[in-house]
Every structure is written in C-alpha cells, then in structure tokens.
Image (spheres, helix red, strand yellow):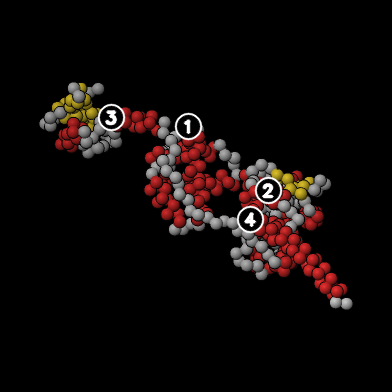
Amino acid sequence: MTKRIKTEKPGVFYRISDRISGTGPEKVYYVVFKKDGKLIEAKAGRQYADAMTPAKAALYRSALIEGREQTPQEKRAAQQAQKEAEKGRYTIGRLWDEYSKGRPAGRALTTDKNRYEKHIEKDFARKEPKDIIKLDVDRLRLRLSKKLSPQTVKHVLNLLTWIINYGVKEGLCQGLSFHVQKPEVNNVTTEDLTPDQVNSLLQAIDNSKYKTVGAMMKLALFSGMRRGEMLKLEWRDVDLERGFIHIREPKGGPDQKIPINDIARELLESLPRSSDYVFPGRGGRKRTNTSKAACEIRKEAGLPKNFRPLHGLRHVFASMLASSGKVDMYVLQKLLTHKSAVMTQRYAHLRDKALKDGAGQVDVIFKKQADDRKAASNE
C-alpha cells in the first residue's frame, strides 16, 4: 500500500494508484475520523473515475461524522444483515413459492399463478402477513371491483387468504389481524332449454362442420360431463364393456366413475379412434379450445347468447333428470360428480315440482271417481 499523503482539508488524504481506465497515476482520496472512540478510515473516491476532489471528500467526511452517510464497510455490513434478516422473513412472495410447490400441476394451479402475478404480486409480494393492514386489502378489492366480476374478485381474495393460511398452518408466519371482506356472489345459475330448443340444437350439431365439438356438446347433454373432463378424456378411460367412464381428477377432486347410458354409448361408438383422446385437437393432440365452434353451433340453433354451449348443457342434463322425479338428489350428485350436496341442491326445486305434480294425480283420480258416482246416482 502506498504512503498516505495529507491534503489542505483536515482529515482528508490521498494515495497514488494506477488509473482504472486510461494510463498514468491518479489520486485515491480517503477520509479519517473518530467514531465511538475508534479511528475510522473510509475511501471517498478516485480522482478521475469518481471526479473526487479534496473539497468533495471533506463534505463526505462531514456526512459520515454526522451519520448522514455510511462508510463502505458499514454499507456492506448493513446489506449482509438485511440478507440474514430476509432469510427468516416469510413474505407473501416467499409463501406463494412454498404454497405453489405443494400443489399438483394443472389448470387450477396455472389459473392461480396468473391471478397471483397479475393482481397480488405487485402490492403484496414483499410484505409479511403481519404487516398487511385491512386498508391494503380493501384497496385491492375496490380496485379489482372496478374492472372484474365479483366472482373473479372473490377468487383473488381467496387466493391471498389461502397463501397466508398455508403459512400459518406451517408455522412460517403470523396470520392477519382482521377478516378479509369478499364480495357477495350469486353464482347459482341453472340454465335450461325447452324440448324444442334441444331439438334445434341437436339438428344444428348434425348439420355443423365442427364434428368433434358437436360430439362434445352431445356428450355434455347425454352425460352431464364438464368441458375440462371431456377435453382430457382418453379412450382408455371409456369402458364400453362395463358401461362406465373414468373421470380423472374432476375439478381437482378424486377420480370418479359415471355410468354410460345407451344414447351416450351410441355416440361414443360412432366416434373415430384416431387418437388417444376421445375429442382430439390438431395432430391428435389434446384439444385446448372449443369456444369458436361451440358458439357458432349455438348461433345456428338459435339459442340465447348467454347460454353457455357446454356448461349450459350440463345444467340441461341435470335439470331433465331432476324434473323426471325419478332421480333423487344423492344419485344426481354422484352423476354430476359434485364434491358436496350443496351444488346439487340448485336442482331440488325441479324434483320437488315433479313429485308435487305426481302427487297431484291423486286429485285427478278421486275427482274422476266422484264424477262417476254422481253420474251413476242421476241415472
């Protein structure tokens, strides 16, 4: 190390060193001062590379003494301390990483990943749950409510609470000190079609150029299967001999089996087996989109624009069974692979009406008997 040389400024020195860029020597300025009884030397900067002068170095020395600046050593120590502190901090971003690692890959995880990155990450990723206040979440809810549906806002807020609840359950963080208010959602939609509308739809499917999507729409009507279940349905899942369809992970739940009725069997037997998938996309690969074709078939059938071509047909299937009065709610729940009876209850009023109409036949029978007796007495 070269000799330290004094300048005209108190506590400011320099040493001669080779230039970083360029040729020849340059001065490297240092400041010296006492802090807490210790003599401290700190580098102020280089003559050419940092445009450092004795006057600038003197100002830097004053800032260090007054605590307005930190020495390079102090900055490094603070950064290291911050890193050590970060290791023990479970922020929302870090909790999301842990939470998502434990979930199975699939559409549900992809959807939640998009929700997290689009709506949660920016404002919450660097915060620990204990640092989140009610106002933070209220602002998120109000901002999302301006452009998204109540159901979507609820999904985002649910995801935030699931991430935090995961951290609490695993002992990684404290929970929130308040209840997350979520929008009220009325998602009990039961779509139905009249017999004439069903006939128009079936005719439109038969006349459509979209044969594969048309077949999917028919199977939704005949079996009540979900769109996602049909998209990933493979021929190995179809047991025509025993009369069952094996549904893998219906809406994230355990595998299920549903019976194949005669009309669904006839449909499945008519389909070509050109791929592992029952309803393949291009090149025999898994199909990922049905909206354009399904909406065009819906249009050709003259159905309302708000009728969902595939999910709506699942409702039609359920409504027909419930309206028959011959299928109880437990059986309907199993056929629809609902996890709980709550979702199935939306069809209960249809079954109740069918039963009431059936009971009403007693009125017809006794009225006829009374009319017959009256007629006989008048003879």
Check disc 3: other Cα within 10 Å, few if <14, some if 14-19, many if 20+.
few
Q: Give the spatial CA distance, label 4 vs label 1.
A: 39 Å
Q: Give the spatial CA distance, label 4 vs label 3.
A: 66 Å
Look at label 4 and name its amino acid.
Arg
Find numbered disc 3 in the image and state the secondary structure of the residue it sits on. helix
The residue located at (50%, 57%) in the rendering is 149
Point out the frontmost of discs 1 and 3: 1
Point out the frontmost of discs 4 and 1: 4
Find numbered disc 1 in the image and state the secondary structure of the residue it sits on. loop
The residue that disc 2 covers is: 337
The residue that disc 1 covers is: 171
Check disc 1: other Cα within 10 Å, few if <14, some if 14-19, many if 20+.
few
Residue 74, label in figure: 3
Check disc 2: other Cα within 10 Å, few if <14, some if 14-19, many if 20+.
many
331 or 238, nearer to the observer: 331
In percent of width and height, residue 127 lies at 40, 40
The residue that disc 4 covers is: 346
Q: Is residue 355 visible?
A: yes
Earlier residue among tags 4 and 2: 2
Look at label 2 and name its amino acid.
Thr
Q: Give the spatial CA distance, label 3 vs label 2.
A: 62 Å
Look at label 3 and name its amino acid.
Glu
Q: Give the spatial CA distance, label 2 vs label 1.
A: 34 Å
**Which residue appears farthest toward the left when viewing the image?**
8
Figure quadrant of residue 262: bottom right
In percent of width and height, residue 94 lies at 46, 37
Point out the frontmost of discs 4 and 3: 4
Kindly indicate whether the residue at mark 2 contacts the one at mark 3 (C-beta within 8 angstroms): no
Check disc 4: other Cα within 10 Å, few if <14, some if 14-19, many if 20+.
some
